[in-house]
Image: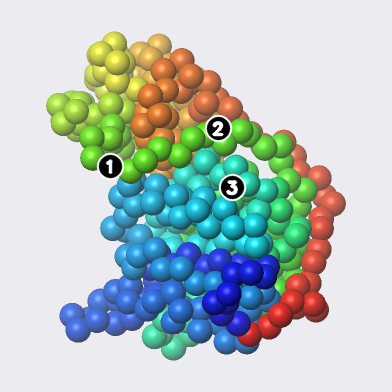
């Protein structure tokens, strides 16, 4: 059921667009067009908890800026000011869901769950996956088992922690993976939620305001034959931070290393990540490799891939964080997770929840 009176416990759906709200347009391409109410209506009678719908905006997530992501996180925080809210679901495009979910995780300071979900098939497709994903996300957001688990991503029945999650397939229904940080649990079509024991939490970072004049952070890739042209162009454009997508364990070449040394000497923060699917960035190699990047002043991202490294660096620079503290934060946030305990908490909200 859709809640109009927020005086009783309920889940809030923050609708931001994405494929889950998309339909074919006059030009042929799918465009985010459905309102949050229309997206929620697709669930039918499968919602495990009463839901209040809030439209944030309607955009494909490939169009989002860092300011848009901050705006979503601000709405999450405003929503959780209501003590009757059990949890929050954010419907979001899959292209940059990993970025927004991670920013939400970095700044989330409430025990109640925030759950991101979306779709791979448009709302007007023959087999839309959005309704099922949304129904399961609502079950997770309203579950007591999800309290204290931070920001989660629920997709195709699997629940992931926001840290380390990434889109792993362009079109498949099972669109996400988290090779290094693992999964957080499962949720069935019937709304049965099973979650692993939470990892130790890290203190939330402040959420800055959105606006013009924010520090520029660019993502530059190392590849066979790459020179420093793109890196220099980024610096000339005024970048305050650069995420270097290295090869292997976080490697580049001699020319890029020289330019990184010049950049860090000038006060630009450089973080080294990797294009490899899993494993940590480790400074092993010289002759333009990761150890030379470390010597040039680059900070290792640990297990964080380029997308989430960019989010963390952007946030820290917006907060005016000194370089030494940025390095400490990446070391903390990018470290290998503790092995989760095998004990799980299971809950079936459909047995007692209000349906609608």
* Horizontal and vertical percent position of residue 131: 53, 79
* Disc 3 element: loop
In the picture, measured across the screen, residue 140 lies left or right of residue 116, that is right
Q: CA distance from mark 3 to mark 1?
A: 34 Å
Q: Which residue has dot 1 on it?
A: 211
Which label lies toward us, 2 or 3?
2
CA neighbours of label 2 inside 10 A, class few (<14), some (14 to 19), many (20+): many
Quarter of the rendering containing residue 248: top left
* Disc 2 element: loop
> Which residue is farthest right?
343
Disc tally is 3
Q: Which residue has dot 2 on it?
A: 334
Residue 29 in view (yes/no): yes
Quadrant in which the C terminus appears:
bottom right
Q: Which residue has dot 3 on it?
A: 179
Q: Is residue 269 depicted above or below 118 in this figure? A: above
CA neighbours of label 3 inside 10 A, class few (<14), some (14 to 19), many (20+): some
Residue 174 in view (yes/no): no
Q: CA distance from mark 1 to mark 2?
A: 28 Å
In the picture, measured across the screen, residue 78 lies left or right of residue 338, that is left
Residue at horizontal 63 percent and vertical 34 percent from the top: 202
* Horizontal and vertical percent position of residue 90: 50, 62
* Horizontal and vertical percent position of residue 185: 70, 58
Which label lies toward us, 3 or 1?
1
């Amino acid at each position: 059921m859709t809640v109009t009176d927020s005086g009783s416990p309920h889940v809030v759906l923050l609708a931001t667009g994405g494929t889950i709200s998309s339909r074919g347009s006059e030009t042929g391409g799918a465009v985010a067009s459905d309102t949050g109410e229309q997206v929620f209506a697709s669930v039918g009678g499968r919602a495990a908890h009463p839901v209040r719908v809030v439209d944030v905006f309607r955009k494909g997530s490939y169009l989002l800026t860092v300011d848009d992501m901050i705006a979503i996180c601000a709405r999450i925080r405003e929503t959780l000011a209501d003590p009757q809210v059990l949890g929050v679901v954010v419907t979001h495009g899959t292209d940059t869901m990993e970025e927004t979910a991670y920013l939400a995780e970095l700044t989330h300071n409430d025990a109640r769950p925030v759950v991101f979900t979306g779709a791979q098939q448009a709302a007007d497709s023959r087999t839309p996956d959005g309704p099922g994903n949304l129904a399961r996300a609502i079950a997770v957001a309203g579950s007591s088992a999800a309290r204290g688990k931070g920001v989660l991503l629920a997709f195709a029945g699997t629940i992931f922690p926001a840290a380390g999650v990434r889109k792993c397939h362009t079109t498949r229904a099972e669109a996400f993976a988290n090779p290094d940080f693992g999964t957080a649990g499962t949720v069935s079509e019937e709304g049965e939620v099973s979650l692993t024991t939470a990892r130790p939490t890290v203190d939330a970072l402040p959420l800055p305001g959105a606006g013009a004049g924010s520090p520029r952070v660019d993502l530059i890739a190392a590849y066979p034959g790459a020179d420093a042209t793109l890196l220099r162009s980024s610096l000339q454009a005024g970048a305050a931070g650069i995420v270097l997508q290295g090869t292997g364990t976080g490697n580049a070449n001699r020319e890029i290393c020289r330019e990184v040394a010049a950049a860090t000497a000038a006060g630009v923060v450089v973080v080294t990540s990797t294009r490899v699917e899993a494993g940590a960035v480790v400074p092993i190699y010289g002759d333009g490799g990761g150890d030379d990047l470390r010597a040039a002043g680059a900070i290792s991202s640990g297990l964080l891939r380029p997308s989430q490294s960019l989010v963390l660096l952007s946030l820290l620079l917006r907060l005016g964080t000194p370089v030494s503290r940025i390095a400490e934060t990446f070391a903390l946030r990018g470290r290998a997770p503790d092995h989760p305990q095998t004990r799980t908490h299971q809950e079936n909200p459909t047995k007692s929840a209000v349906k609608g």
